[in-house]
Image (spheres, grey):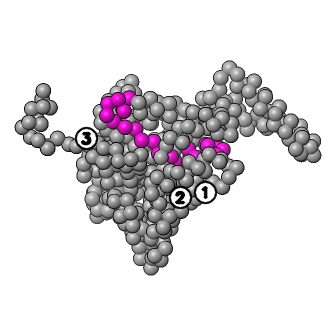
Amino acid sequence: MRLLVLLLLFPGTLPAAPRQVDAYRWEDVERIVAIGDIHGDYDAYIGVLQAAGLVDARGRWQAGTTHLVQTGDIPDRGPDTRRIIEHMAALATQAHKRGGRVHNLMGNHEAMNVYGDLRYAVAGEFSAWADQRSAERRERHYAAAMDDLKQLDPQRFAALPADFRTQWDAAHPLGWIEHRMAWDPRFDSRGPMFRWVMDAEVSIQLNDTIFVHGGISHAYCGNSLESLTAMAHAQLREGDDGELGILTDSAGPLWYRGLAGVAPAAPRATVDAILERHGARHIVIGHTVSESVVWPRLDARVIQIDTGMSRAYGGAAGWLEIQGNQLSAGYRGGRVPLPADDAGRLAYLDAVIALQPANAALAERRAALAAGALDAAQAQADAAAVDPAAICSTSR
């Protein structure tokens, strides 16, 4: 009844309902919360969701029509990847029933787990998949691998050291087989983690803001959001039997750091071209840790949200919140509006330091910003004569 009275008395004053344009774009989303790299730390993940008001004490969705964006890199460096992804999948269902959404983007570590680069996986990642039959599965896998080696390369088989089995077991702990069955389509194309990654987009746009894990470089500036995901999914289906292309390209959206000001930084002209290409005002990125602070760059054209929430990076909780044209950063101690231009970043950083006075990384960042060192690579990129090809290539 109250809603009907409002509509009769003040027609057109209520916010428009969120509208999905297509699989990669939404309009009129009233509230957006974005979080960066989680890296296997469930407690940090849940803590941020609770601090942002997205979930209750039981971890259930309570944020109505809010859209949550997680910009990738859930796996590795911590032991809780499976637990986080399973919770997030359930959370997406809960949010959808209440008019909200959970958007999971692909990071380089999701891709790495699919194509088998496990150098950052910790022991807990494998033990999370172990069950009563893990020892039996591992034994069968070892026997099959030895049979193949004996037939295909008998000389190498004969030269195996006496302690080879011990070395092999250390490299394949219990749960390793099940982990690979979950992630690697060559083991099982129905694996739940593989299907999870194949359901993730590389980049999406909500209202006037693009979200992507690493960034969009000049080499991919001409690509549509759809094509970025299509290329990544195509390479994931092939695994490491094919060229990994966009999945490992240092200029690709999973690995690129130029938008974060890492040399060679993306010139302002490139950033402007990307925004114009997509009709956007902001690009939100994870991947490059911004030491405990949600960090705006280039007059908030670029916003870094990988605060290092995982224990592996110090456990600094932070998130980006967008309501209408208002952008703010959330921390355990409160929220701070983001400055609209770079001139306001010192005052912004002072406000964040007031919430976390014992955080040495913030004090170091402030000193670097005041000295001009923080944006040195950006200044060099902007001062250089820009090759038109370095502004925006057609597409990959």
- C-alpha gap between disc 2 and disc 3: 34 Å
- C-alpha gap between disc 3 and disc 1: 39 Å
Label 3 crowd (10 A; few <14 / some 14-19 / many >=20): few
> Dot 2: what SS?
loop
In the displayed structure, 40 sits above or below 275; it is above
Residue at left 50%, top 41%?
199
Task: Name the residue carrying label 2.
Answer: 252
**The residue positioned farthest toward the left in the image shown:** 9
Task: Name the residue carrying label 3.
Answer: 17
Q: Visible in this render: residue 319?
A: no
> Dot 3: what SS?
loop
In the displayed structure, 52 sits above or below 240; it is above
- Are the residues at dot 1 and dot 2 in contact (C-beta closer than 8 Å)? yes
Residue at left 34%, top 44%?
20
- Magenta stretch contains residue 112: yes
Split into 4 quadrants, where in the image is the N terminus?
top left
Label 1 crowd (10 A; few <14 / some 14-19 / many >=20): some
Label 2 crowd (10 A; few <14 / some 14-19 / many >=20): many
Location of residue 70 in the rendering, given as x and y in whole percent from the top left corner: 43, 43
Discs 2/3, front: 3
Q: Nearer the viewer, residue 246 or 122?
A: 246
Task: Name the residue carrying label 1.
Answer: 245
- C-alpha gap between disc 1 and disc 2: 9 Å
**Image quadrant where residue 47 sits:** top left
What residue range appears in magenta?
A: 94-118
Discs 1/2, front: 1
> Dot 1: what SS?
helix
Q: Amino acid at mark 1?
A: Gly
Is 291 positioned to the left or the right of 186 in the image? left
Q: Nearer the viewer, residue 63 or 198?
A: 198
